[in-house]
Amino acid sequence: MTTIHLSKASAAKTRTDALIVGVVKTEKGPQVTAEAVASAFGRTFAKTLTGMGVKGSPGEVVKMPGAGAVKTPLVVLVGLGDADEVTEETLRRAVGAGVRSLAGVDTASVAVPTDTAERVAAAAEGALLGGYTYDRYLSDSSDQPVGEVTILTELVRDDAALAGVERATAVIAAVNAARTWVNTPPGDLTPPIFADEIVAAAEGTSIEVDVLDETRLEELGYGGIMGVGRGSSHPPRLVTLSYTPSEPVAHIALVGKGITFDSGGISIKPSASMYTMKCDMAGAAAVVAATFAVAELGLPVQVTTYASLAENLPSGTATRPGDVLTMYGGKTVEVLNTDAEGRLVLADAITTASELQPDLIVDVATLTGACVVALGDRTGGIMANDDNFRSSVHASAETAGESMWPLPLPEEMAEKVKASKIADLSQIQTERWGGALFAGAFLREFVGEGITWAHLDIAGTAFNEGKPWGYTPKGGTGFAVRTLVQLATERANGSAPAAAGDA
């Protein structure tokens, strides 16, 4: 993993293999944010930038030689957008893009606006996110990520800045762990293997892990998880992680969908729709990784996390459309499409989480294509049974730098969820519209009375099928980890707005 250092060295005199410099748009044209670099290249440097086609637009990355003007042989210009509109997320993306462009380089320094502790931390996060690679199966992995990044700032002895870098290191390590799990081929991350990896990762930490295998799941009546996983020769698991600090100020339960491969089951997907279905466990990866980050940071918040792991495959033992499952807790569900399996494994875990009466439950899932249709592939959806909490989660996501948007849970969806003639609940609706909202309304049926709950649909954001952008690589993104840690952090320091269900 890339390591971060802080230094007061001049951007023009720092001796690393590459120098990443921010460029902003101004009325006079593009301007670098490091005055020492502008001075080193001379008075005509602004014209040089314009002649090179540099605009300073967000996402722009342009490389040029140091040419002896600065001590680094390579200068990487990264766009920050309008000079008066540079945000922490702007810095994350720009630094991430710059670091990502330097694969194979040993050391790099970063000269972007770092006049506050928050900006220093954002630059560190961007560097760590941009430095991620997944090369487990590559015979030639010579393009390693940048090993060491030095952030140039006057705040080298500032306690808040140092704490921000320490926090960034812990949080982004968790994001990158989630990315790696999502990127792992499904044959090498079956439910039992994933459960074993979680157990191994918890060794030496303050997190306790309990795993229910298929025998115990059957005995305890986990009809949703067993119903989804019974078609596979790799049996399902329910993994519980418990982080309990000495004097917790709140108790958060996290639930993650962990379908390690989704063929659609008997309602089988077209082959082209299966290419990326190893990512259908991204919700479980996110909640597990976030739990490790919360524990690493030592936040005074109790976290109980449930990863519902199953592989959805067709076979002679698979659940059929038309079957009725008895879920954990006793509710019955008529299955109409075995490719809507995620809500079934989540429902069992949400019921289990409700038994502990936590202050909050947040579930994370690559749940519906309908959410992708509504919000695209870079924005996740937020639904909740409490308007204040939904707004709070949205604010946490914005602070963390993850794009999410609130969605409603209209009451007519509750009626549609109960439309089955032979069971308590219908797994899907027969009409096409509002699929993401129906799924959220279905999950709400399993939340314990009086418990504040939110559902994050990350179907479009968990896996980047296109080109890398900003700090986001191709493949697993680790989406939602930062939001969950931010949510826990706000609960820890008492800055989160109260939800209606709070005591």
Image (tube, rainbow, N blue to C red):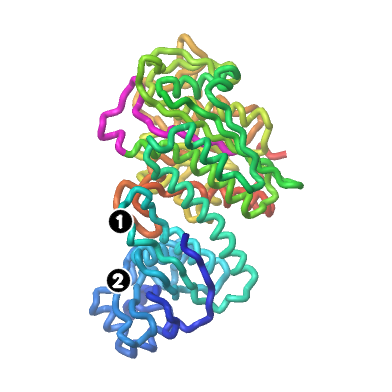
Helix, strand, or loop for circle 2?
Answer: strand
Residue 83: percent from the left, percent from the top? 41, 73
Disc 1: which residue: 140
> To which residue does mark 2 refer?
62
Is 292 positioned to the left or the right of 261 in the image? Answer: right
- Which of pointers 1 and 2 indicates the residue nearer the eye? 1
**Where is 184 relative to 419, above or below?**
below
Q: Which of 160/140 is in front?
A: 140
Q: Residue furthest front?
A: 139
* Dot 2 crowding, Cα within 10 Å, few <14, some 14–19, many 20+: many
Q: Is residue 157 above or below residue 224?
A: below
Identify which residue is drawn at 55% across, 47% down: 290
Q: Amino acid at mark 2?
A: Val
- Location of residue 340 with respect to 40 vertically, above or below: above
Residue 257 lies in the magenta stretch? yes
Q: Is residue 285 above or below residue 114?
A: above
Q: In terms of depth relative to the viewer, which is nearer, 65 or 107? A: 107
Label 1 secondary element = loop
Q: Position of residue 74 (x, y in %)?
A: 33, 77
Q: Evaluate whether residue 371 shows in this view.
A: no
Q: Which residues are magenta?
A: 254-275
Residue at the image position 47 percent from the left and 65 percent from the top: 87
Q: Give the left or right position of residue 146, taking residue 353 as reference.
A: left
| Image coordinates for residue 334, horizontal then vertical, percent | 45, 15
